[in-house]
Amino acid sequence: MLKMDEIQKRLLSEVAGLHEVPEGAYNIRSNGEAAGRATTANIDIIPREDGQGITVRIKEGTKNESVHIPVVMTKSGLTEIVYNDFYVGAGADVTIVAGCGIDNCGPKDSEHDGIHRFFLEKGARVKYVEKHYGSGSGSGKRILNPRTEVTMGDDSFMEMEMVQIKGVDDTDRVTEATLSKGARLVVRERLMTHEEQNAVSAYVVELNGEGCSADVVSRSVARDRSYQKFDAKLIGNAACSGHTECDSIIMDEGRILAVPGLEANNVDAALVHEAAIGKIAGDQLIKLMTLGLTEQEAEEQIINGFLK
């Protein structure tokens, strides 16, 4: 494993919760290069020939194992595209931790675009955690554009935790999923933008199999002059159920756009969309301020609780 400086270690901790080399399979990428890789008897990680990504193969029936694939960037002006494919065998039950941290202290933009494709076989279960984080005092932007494509076999399950709380100037997240019979998809997105930041999240879920379901929920806070767009489309092509929800707090001069999309192509497709955008309630602030908090401290407490 390549030696990392303190900034890279801090980024690794922020996006993957790692303070040392993780147990199990991992692939760590730093400034466009492989920084460390390990496999297990059940999880193989194969690098692409061009160096721009990996293929992860998880054996049928694998249980209680994890894969960490974080990316850290500290060079200003660096732009990269990485392609990662995950093949999860039938009956496997694993956790995959991804994420990218960018520390940009220079004048040029730094950008990481990650394309992740997941293929879940019958009965496979995956918990996928993807965290984005930005820092650095430079004038160059920190840009992250993840694209996730999920193909879910019969009776498979995938839980996706998508988190972006601090420091990312621009992000355009696209998630597409196709569900077969009995498959279940759960997405929990947490997002906060501030200053002039922009964040777009687009989800397209095709519910193709009888009894499949999707639950896509986003919670977000837009501060200062930042902009957010949540665009979620569910397509019910079978007897299925789907739910999307956008719950947002708007502050200062922030702007938020929620775009619901429901398409039912089967009489037994049950699809629901909910959206709520509003400011922090005054009575909540007053209640906390009576306990001794300043208005700013009270706002932070409410936001922290909302984004948990």
Image (cartoon, rainbow, N blue to C red):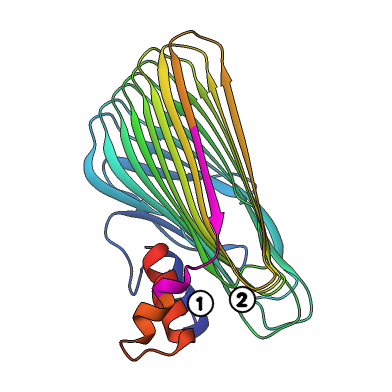
Measured as percent of width and height from the top left, residue 5 is found at 50, 83
Mark 2 burial class by Cα count in 10 Å: few <14, some 14-19, many 20+: many
Q: Does the magenta portion include 283? A: yes
Disc 2: which residue: 74
Q: Are the residues at dot 1 and dot 2 in contact (C-beta closer than 8 Å)?
A: yes
Q: Which residues are magenta?
A: 273-284
Residue situated in front as seen by the camera: 16 or 306: 306
Q: Residue furthest top?
A: 267
> Is residue 29 shown to the viewer in this render?
no
Q: Residue at x 23, y 31 (%)?
A: 61
Q: Secondary structure at mark 1?
A: helix
Q: Residue at x 56, y 11 (%)?
A: 265
Disc 1: which residue: 8
Q: Quadrant of residue 59?
A: top left
Q: Secondary structure at mark 2?
A: loop
Placement of 48 over or under 179, stated as above or below: below
Q: Quadrant of the C terminus?
A: bottom left
Placement of 192 over or under 272, stated as above or below: below
Q: Quadrant of the N terminus?
A: bottom left
